Image (cartoon, helix red, strand yellow):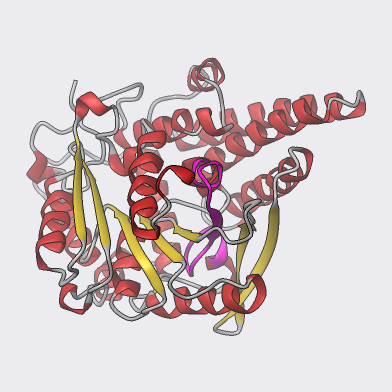
C-alpha cells in the first residue's frame, strides 16, 4: 500500500509505501526507530511492542508509549549496573535513549517536548560512559547562545573528521544511531552538533537560519581550536533539511574536503509552499492530531506562532549551486517525493564541482526511504566509500 498514489498532492512524501501506521508521519518515524536498531537503538520486537500501544495518528499515545518503555529500559540498565554488568547496562541505556528520543517526536512544543529531551540527553550521556565510547561533549558559542554537540575521537589521531548535520526532526545525539556510529567504526572521527532550531535550541531562542553557513562555520572554528581539526581533512554531511544547511555551507566555506547530502535540498521554501498548498486543496484529508502537533513544533523551530508567517520566514532558504566547487556526493532514495528528487537532480547537474557523484537508491536496496531510513547502514557505506576515495584511504579504513 502506498501512502502517496498522487505525488503532486503530497510533495513532502518520504516513504514509497506503508510499513506500520496509516498516518504517514508516524510511519516514517516508526521506521526511524526501527532503523536505529542495528546501531544500538530499539530491537525489532521492542519497537513493535511499543507500536502496539499507540493509536494511529494520536500523538499523545505515541509520546506515552515510547516514554513508558524508555522508563522500563532505564530501570533495567540501573539494575544491571548495580550488578556490575556495565556493558549490558550501557546497551540498555542506549536503547532507553532511543525510546526517549522517539517519544518527543509528537510531543507538544514547550514544556513536554523539553522534558522528554532532557531524559534522552541524560540517558545518552550515561550510555556513552557505560559503553566506554570516546565521546566528548562541547558547546559552540553562537549568537550569544550555545550549540551543543559531541566529538568522537577515533583511535587513529590522524583520522579525518566527519561533521554530521541533521534535519528538521533531529537532535545531535540521534545522529549517532543514524550514521555516526557506523562512520566511527569505519575509521573516522565524528562530530555531531545541533544547529539553530535543532534539538531543543529553539527553547533558548535559536531558530532555523537561511544563512546556515554561519553556525556551521562557528562549529568548524571550534573543531580547529579545541580538537585540532585540519582544514582539508574535514568532511561535511547533511541529512534531510541538513541537505540544505550543508548545500549553503558548501558555497561559502573552503575548509571541507568534501560535502555529502542525503538529499541535496537547495530550496526548502519550495517544498514548504507546495506542502501548504496541498493541505489547503479542496478535498484534502484533515491532518491527524500527530501531524498537527508536528507542525506546531516545526513552527517553534522556525520561530513563528502563526501558519501564515511560516512561508515568509523561510523564503530566503535557498542555496546557489554556482558557488559550489567542492567534491560533492548526492544521495537520493527513490521513495522520496518528486520535489526532493527534482531538487537533488538539479543540484547535481548545476554545481560546478569537477568531482561529483549521484547515487539513486531503489526499493531493492531497502534504502529508498528518506535519508535511507530503513537501511542506515547503506547510507554510511555510500558516504564512507566516497570519503575513502576523497581522502585516499582505500582499504586501510
Q: In this view, does 351 lie above or below 390?
A: below
Q: Which residue is drawn at 66% across and 74% down?
A: 226
Residue 393 visible here:
yes
Location of the N terminus (image quadrant): top left
State the residue lying farthest toward the bottom: 144
Camera-side residue: 392 or 42? Answer: 392
Q: In this view, does 36 lie above or below 293?
A: above
Residue 107 visible here:
no
Q: Is residue 15 above or below residue 165?
A: above
Q: What is the x, y in percent for residue 185?
A: 55, 41
Q: What is the x, y in percent for residue 75?
A: 79, 28
Q: What is the x, y in percent for residue 47?
A: 52, 22
Residue 195: say if magenta. Answer: yes
Q: Which residue is drawn at 52% across and 67% down?
A: 202
Q: In this view, does 334 lie to the left or right of 183?
A: left
Q: Which residue is drawn at 50% across and 34% down?
A: 36
Q: What is the x, y in percent for residue 86?
A: 82, 30
Q: What stretch is highlighted in magenta?
A: 182-201
Where on the picture, by quarter, is residue 27?
A: top left
Q: Is residue 356 left or right of residue 89?
A: left
Residue 238: say if magenta. Answer: no
Number of callouts: 0
Q: Residue at x 76, y 44 (%)?
A: 126
Amino acid at each position: 500500500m502506498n501512502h502517496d498514489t498522487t505525488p503532486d498532492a503530497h510533495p513532502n512524501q518520504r516513504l514509497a509505501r506503508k510499513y506500520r501506521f496509516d498516518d504517514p508521519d508516524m510511519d516514517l518515524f516508526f521506521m526511524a526507530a526501527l532503523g536505529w536498531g542495528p546501531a544500538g537503538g530499539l530491537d525489532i520486537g521492542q519497537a513493535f511492542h511499543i507500536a502496539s500501544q499507540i493509536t494511529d495518528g494520536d500523538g499523545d499515545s505515541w509520546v506515552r508509549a515510547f516514554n513508558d518503555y524508555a522508563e522500563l529500559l532505564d530501570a533495567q540498565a540501573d539494575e544491571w549496573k548495580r550488578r556490575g554488568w556495565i556493558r549490558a547496562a550501557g546497551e540498555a541505556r542506549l536503547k532507553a535513549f532511543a525510546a526517549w528520543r522517539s517519544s518527543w517526536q509528537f510531543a507538544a512544543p514547550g514544556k513536554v517536548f523539553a522534558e522528554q529531551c532532557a531524559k534522552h540527553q541524560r540517558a545518552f550521556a550515561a550510555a556513552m560512559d557505560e559503553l566506554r565510547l570516546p565521546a566528548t561533549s562541547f558547546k559552540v558559542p553562537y549568537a550569544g547562545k550555545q550549540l551543543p554537540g559531541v566529538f568522537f575521537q577515533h583511535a587513529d589521531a590522524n583520522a579525518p573528521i566527519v561533521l554530521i548535520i541533521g534535519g528538521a526532526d533531529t537532535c545531535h545525539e540521534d545522529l549517532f544511531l543514524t550514521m555516526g556510529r557506523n562512520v566511527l567504526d569505519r575509521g573516522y572521527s565524528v562530530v555531531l552538533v545541533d544547529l539553530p532550531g535543532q534539538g531543543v535550541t529553539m527553547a533558548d531562542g535559536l531558530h532555523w537560519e537561511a544563512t546556515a553557513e554561519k553556525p556551521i562555520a562557528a562549529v568548524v572554528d571550534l573543531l580547529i581550536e579545541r580538537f585540532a581539526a585540519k582544514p582539508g581533512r574535514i568532511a561535511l554531511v547533511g541529512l534531510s533539511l541538513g541537505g540544505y544547511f550543508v548545500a549553503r555551507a558548501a558555497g561559502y566555506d573552503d575548509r571541507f574536503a568534501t560535502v555529502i547530502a542525503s538529499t541535496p535540498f537547495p530550496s526548502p521554501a519550495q517544498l514548504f509552499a507546495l506542502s501548504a498548498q496541498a493541505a489547503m486543496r479542496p478535498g484534502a484529508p484533515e491532518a491527524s492530531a500527530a501531524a498537527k502537533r508536528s507542525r506546531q513544533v516545526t513552527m517553534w523551530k522556525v520561530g513563528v506562532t502563526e501558519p501564515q508567517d511560516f512561508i515568509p520566514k523561510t523564503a530566503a532558504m535557498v542555496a546557489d549551486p554556482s558557488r559550489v566547487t567542492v567534491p560533492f556526493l548526492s544521495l537520493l532514495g527513490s521513495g522520496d517525493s518528486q520535489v526532493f528528487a527534482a531538487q537533488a537532480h538539479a543540484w547535481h547537474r548545476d554545481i560546478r564541482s569537477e568531482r561529483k557523484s549521484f547515487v539513486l537508491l531503489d526499493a531493492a536496496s531497502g534504502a529508498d526511504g528518506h535519508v535511507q531510513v530503513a537501511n542506515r547502514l547503506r547510507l554510511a557505506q555510500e558516504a564512507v566509500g566516497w570519503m575513502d576515495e576523497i581522502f585516499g584511504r582505500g582499504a586501510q579504513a
